Image (tube, rainbow, N blue to C red):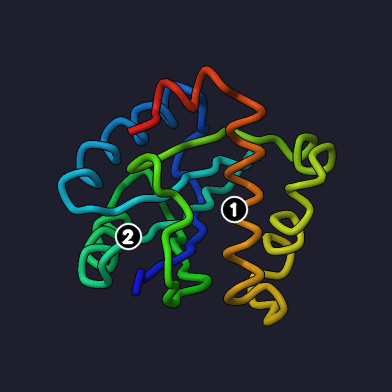
Amino acid sequence: MIYYIIYTSTPSSPVDLETVNAITKEAIKWNKAHDVTGMLLSLDDKYFQFLEGEEEEVKKLFNMIKKDSRHKDVTLRIQGFSNERVFTEWSMGSWMLTNEELTKLSALADLKEFLQDPVNNNLQSKRFISMMSNLLNTWIAHEPERSKKFKN
């Protein structure tokens, strides 16, 4: 079984593409060594991250993130187990989104709903895994250059 967590946090300083790319490059290195995969989304004033792998490794990484000075108000939103990984092709992907993009891309409707009500039980489990899969497919289609750059 694959353990996964979803958390949100607030960036401790304004986020730009350079910051997200730096976080992603660090994550790729650590995640490869610990067989963790996932995706980091930067949404204007919030980070949203999905991490998956062996339970002990994901929890260790999450504890490191909670201590990372680039994050504040780190909040675990969902955790659980899945039969398979969502992000099989790389150790970490990242995507900067604006609130405007959330309203334009239909595949992101569930994500917007989640961010507005993160404890909504309807978004738990299989529906959430499906949502992350849809998000992954949208990310690949939307920014093919970035998917090649960070695909690992």
Q: Classify residue 128 as left or right of residue 122.
A: left
Element assignment for label 1: helix
Residue at 52% x, 71% y is 77
The quadrant of the rendering that contains the C terminus is top left
The quadrant of the rendering that contains the N terminus is bottom left
- For marks 1 and 2, give the one nearer the viewer: 1
Seen in the picture, residue 43 relative to 110 is either above or below; the reply is above
User: From mark 1 to mark 2, how far is it between C-alphas?
Assistant: 25 Å
Name the residue carrying label 1: 133
Residue at 44% x, 77% y is 80
- Count every numbered label the image shows and give the total: 2
Residue type at numbered disc 1: Ser
Q: Position of residue 135 (x, y in %)?
A: 63, 47
- Taking depth in this image into account, of 84 and 103 the one nearest to the observer is 84
Residue at 42% x, 59% y is 85
- Taking depth in this image into account, of 59 and 16 the one nearest to the observer is 59
Name the residue carrying label 2: 66
